[in-house]
Every structure is written in C-alpha cells, then in structure tokens.
Image (cartoon, rainbow, N blue to C red):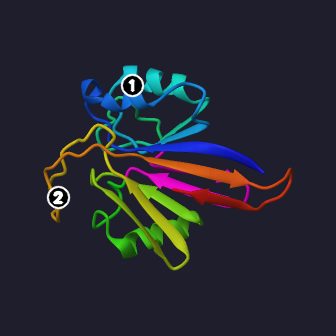
Amino acid sequence: MTSRLVLCLGDLFIPDRASFKKLLAPGKIGQILCLGNLTSASIYEYLRGIAPDLQIVKGDYDVEAPNLALSKVVTHGSLRIGFTHGHTIIPPGDADSLLIAARQMDVDVLLWGGTHRFEAYEMEGKFFVNPGSATGAVSWGWGGEGEGEGVPSFVLMDVSCWGVGDDKAHADF
C-alpha cells in the first residue's frame, strides 16, 4: 500500500497573511490542490517548493492567470478528486449545485472554495469538502454562521492506494 499526503488550500488572497507557511515543510506533502485566488507569484513559487505536484484552478481574483482551468480532476488509484474555486457554483455552496458538478466531473470527492469557510459532508456516496481559507480571508456575502470571523483552515488528505496496478484507493481527511 502506498500513501500520499495531499494538501488542499483555498482562497489564499493576501501573501503576508500566510502564517500557514510555518506548518509546511518540503518533502512531506506529495501533492497540493489549490482552489484559486493565489493572487501572488511569490505564493505560487513557495507552494511549488513544498510539493512536487502542484495543481491549481482559477479563482475569481486570479486575473493575472487567464490560462488556468476553472476545474480539474486528479486520480489516485480509482479515487477521482475534482476541484474548483467555487465561484462558478450557483448559488454559492449550494449542496444540490455541488452534487450536479460532482456528477458532471464524475468524481468521488469534490473540493470547492470561494466561501472562505471550512465545510465537509457526504451526500449520495460522494464527499464534499471546502477547505476554507488558508490565510483566514474574511467570509463575506454568503451569509450563515461565522461570517466575518476569518479563521484560517486547510485540509490534509491521506490518500492510500493498494498494490501496483491495483485500482483500490481510500482517502482520510
């Protein structure tokens, strides 16, 4: 069985608020899935040094990166993980809209951002995870509990695959 740590980051926004940097050491993380709004080339370079496999999608504030995809799918064995910033999900964070996106992407896990709040749940055999904002960007405009608190958060997944050529996979959050 092989195991890989996958770091999921969302809505970084302000590079000098990036206190999460202290928690990350090169050589520990195998892959980073970034849900957009890097807004800084220096953060891109920093993340590139943390993990050999950096995957990024375009956030609504990534105006200097017009060629980034709005969504992507990565696979670990048979486990398919889709990710998107979330600004294309209407209404924002809506469970039914996220389920439709997960079905369209044909994924087992859907990661989305944009709300700046951590959220995780299972629906119809699929997992939905919003890592929140790694820098604690303030939550605004979406309503709900905790709006405006700006609590930093991220998700670290331990993705395990069994055997060479075996398509079984499992993720722990």
Amino acid type at mark 1: Ile
Residue occupying the point 39% across, 27% down: 21
The reply to whether callout 1 and callout 2 are in contact (CB within 8 Å) is no
**SS at mark 2?**
loop
Q: Is residue 36 above or below residue 109?
A: above
Q: Nearer the viewer, residue 165 or 158?
A: 158
Query: The residue under label 2 is which amino acid type?
Result: Gly
Identify the residue at horizontal 31%, vertical 29% (top origin): 18
Residue 106 percent across, percent down from the top left: 60, 66
Q: Is residue 150 magenta?
A: no
- Image coords of residue 51 (percent x, y): 57, 30
> Which numbered marker is on residue 43?
1
- Answer few, some or many: residues within 10 Å of disc 1's Cα (few below 14, many 20 plus, some between 14 and 19): some
Identify the residue under disc 2. Answer: 146
Residue 172 numbered tag: none
Question: In the rendered image, is residue 74 in sight?
Answer: no
Mark found first going from the N terminus, 1 or 2: 1
| Residue depicted at 46% across the width and 21% down the height | 45
Q: Which residues are magenta?
A: 69-85
Taken as a whole, is the magenta stretch helix, strand or loop?
strand
Residue 82 rendering spot, x and y as whole percentages: 53, 56
Q: For this rendering, which residue is in front, 148 or 113?
A: 148
Q: Secondary structure at mark 1?
A: helix
Q: Is label 1 or label 2 in front?
A: 2
